[in-house]
Image (cartoon, rainbow, N blue to C red):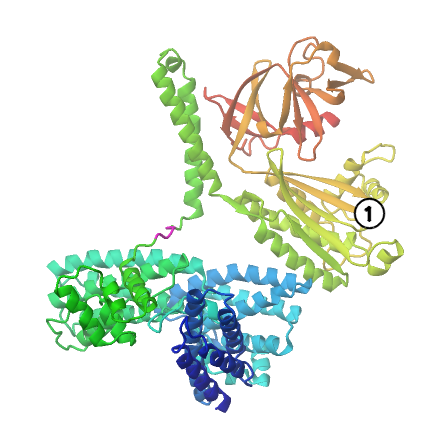
Amino acid sequence: MNNDSRTVHEIVNSAVADLLLVDASDKGPLGGVISKMEQVSGSAGIPEALVTMAKRIAKLAEFIIMETTPFEEGFRQLSDGLSKMAQNAGTYLVNEENAGAPPGERNPGETGESGAPADMVELFTKFGQQLLITLEDFEMYVLEYEKGAQEALQEIKRMLHTWKGEFGVLDIKDHVDCIHSLEERILSAGSADTDELFRFKDLLESAAEKMKSGMIPLLPEQYRITLASTGGEQHSQQEAGESIGVVETADEAQTDSGEEEIGANADKGLLADFVTEAHDHIHRSETLLLELEVDPSKMEHINTIFRACHTIKGVAGFLSLKTLTKVAHSTENLMDQVRKGALALTPQRIDLLFEAMDCLKEMIAAVAGAIEGIPFEVPESASYIIGRLEASSSGEAQPAQAVYREKRVGEMLVEQGSASERQVECALKKQLQGDERPIGELLIEEKVPPRVIGKALAAQTKAKTTAVEVEDTIRVPVKRLDMLIDAIGEGVIAQSMVYANGAVAQLKDIALEKKIAQSMLIMRQIQEMSMSLRMVALRSTFQKMARLVRDLSKKVGKDVEFAMEGEDTELDKSVVENIGDPLIHMLRNSLDHGIESADERSASGKPQKARITIRAYHKAGNVCIEIEDDGRGLDREKIRGKAIERGLCKQSEQLSDQEVYQFIFMPGFSTAAVVTDISGRGVGMDVVQRNISALRGAIDIQSEQGKGTLFTIRLPLTLAIINGMVIRLNNERYIVPTLSILESILPEKNQIETVVGREEVLKVRGELVRLIRLEELFFGAGTGSRDKEGIALVVEDAMGRNVALYVDEIIDQQQVVIKSLGEGVGDIPGVSGGAIMSDGTISLILDIAGIMRIAAE
């Protein structure tokens, strides 16, 4: 055992004693506190956390002496910090004394993977799911650290420390040792190897997947060898089991020795889920206890309550809520004895169980408060309830008069040593003699410091306040959500049919029209709300791309900077899930073919570090995802030559750049001279085109040889509902997406001009916009008279190109539910889907980019 450890413990306790002598009028003892904290921070072989706390406490004491910090606030923080530090120093001392204890049994997964214990399966599953989410943040921090962001290393260390505690709670010792070993190497070196961090992330990702399935993860052999060589297996179990709720800073420390701390590093999402689930378990248990009071023989009710307590105990243990775990465990033990028939479920025991449920509810409310930033406090009744439950489980008779009551202010002050019994008795005597002043005022007259009275009153008031609002959540299967959205879409269609019905229109009832309009507004709000449930950000997908670029750039030996923009852009969940593969193929091509070697870049006057940017943004009712690199660009002539060689075009054909670039999406098309394990086989871009088309999207290419390439993927914001402008061509109705329309114009004859005797353009405020007569495009040239009056819709595609669509009439604007045309019809150029109109007929939804392509052919 390290002698410095015991010395530090003694110094901290001495500083706590000095603090008791401090008053607003006498700050002299704070000098002793500063001196002792400097001793602690200079001690060898103690945790960095204690050193940091000591330095902060010393600095705070200086601020109080110099009156930079208000005395009352500063003294409270100082008291809290020293109290927490004394506790942590004591814990560290115990760890030192136990360091030589024989190591615990190995992880059950050592000799082969096995399932988690039956009572831990749910806990393993939940932790595995949460771990996968936090690993995405970990990867992001590693990428930032690799770029030079030193502050990211602090987040990496924090996450490692948190995971070490979480794996310790689940008793997965090998992974605890592995994390501890990595943590120690980072602390000793003051830096981290990003390659090692990425390998470690992959290790935890594999472990999380197994834990999601209720399995105990097995540490790979190479990690065991590393641990054995570094002495990692000597890491003590008590140190490995550090709580995720441990707080290492003075300003985050607990306030009283009777409190537990929910740390800043504790996952608020897990805590909120626990609050919701625990409330459900307790409510169910109380309902069953009422039935058991009538008929104690219902074994299924007893088993259900037992399982509820067992679940609460498990999750509370995982979250390091020690007292709550003890109450749940003691309740579980009592129920276990009852279900085994060892004890009878007497009225007295049912009353005790109800009290236990009340105690659990009070603590869960305190957890809910901690989520909102209210310090977590263990209720006074907890230890009393635990004692009664344990006594009842052992078969001991319960004292009939043992009733817990709320402590009075005077009792609290006497217990704390802030007031003597004589002072409290004198104040109470005055009240009995008719003095109506509050007890606090009377105690001040008895020379009790106002500060300690105020603190006691605040604690008493806080103990009475348990109602805390926590946002409730509920898990819903995606399939049910899709069914709901489909049903709402059908409801919109049905409502529009009712509104358009001639019988309703003839009623001429203003009140009815208002009600129908109100119902349509409500339906639209429901529709928009339901659609928002499916929208997810692209951040997670983009972060995976960042890791891909990082790994591949090292593999091919190219220095590449990867940038992300617009990662918070939201897109339909089904689109996000299917866009990953196309992005991977495009980034692999950019790295392998687009980005030059360092020598090539230097020779062409470019910086040696290449840049690849992925960005997302909204435009014209779509979400655009761009992948841009500053590489060599596409070789137009080489692509064209390969297309001629394969018979895809003729030597005499004059093709635009876009037409040439589209050849790279043909199956098996590749201009690569060498096939690598990254790209060059001519299958990747074919997959890209097919997957994007399946999402009703499109992809465009802009490239300049020697400068770089920009790929733009245009995707629909949602696959279900759009706002559309209903137009008429002859006797047919079509729908143009409203977000694609820039303006509508009733053109004069002098605004339309013919170019080269065939093409038409529309003059719009001095600019020329190509005019497309949809009637001729759909039904053939010469089908309509060019003298016929109509309306021009100036529309824009996702690439920012404008055209004017000439139509007969604008009929209406409405929300429509997109319907697939079905396999029998297949894909129709210029059409993205269909919609059922209010009269039951079907109208086609126009694809602006597709219409532009048809018109260009």
316 or 257: nearer the eye? 257
Q: Residue furthest top?
A: 787
Q: Amino acid at mark 1?
A: Lys
Q: Element type at marker 1?
A: loop
Q: Considering only vertical position in the picture, is 699 above or below 780?
A: below
Give yes or no for residue 17 being in the magenta stretch. no
Q: Where's residue 505, x and y in %?
A: 40, 13
User: Which residue appears at 76% of the width and 62% of the height?
Assistant: 556
Q: How many marks?
A: 1
The main secondary structure of the magenta stretch is loop
Specify the quadrant of the image occupied by residue 508.
top left
Q: Residue furthest right?
A: 603
Q: Where's residue 154, x and y in %?
A: 58, 67
Q: Residues within 10 Å of mark 1 (few under 14, many from 20)?
A: some
Reading the image, the residue beneath label 1 is 707
Q: Where's residue 132, x and y in %?
A: 51, 61
Q: Is residue 14 left or right of residue 302?
A: right
User: Which residue appears at 28% of the width and 62% of the height?
Assistant: 463
Q: Which residues are magenta?
A: 469-473
Q: Is residue 119 left or right of residue 230?
A: left
Q: Is residue 619 left or right of residue 600?
A: left
Q: Is residue 111 visible?
A: no
316 or 460: nearer the eye? 460
User: Which residue appears at 70% of the width and 50% of the height?
Assistant: 613
Query: In what quadrant of the picture does the C terminus appear?
Result: top right
Q: Considering only vertical position in the picture, is 630 above or below 74?
A: above
User: Which residue appears at 52% of the width and 61% of the height?
Assistant: 134
Q: Considering only vertical position in the picture, is 530 above or below 197?
A: above
Specify the quadrant of the image occupied by residue 79.
bottom left
Q: Where's residue 16, x and y in %?
A: 41, 79
Q: Is residue 242 visible?
A: yes
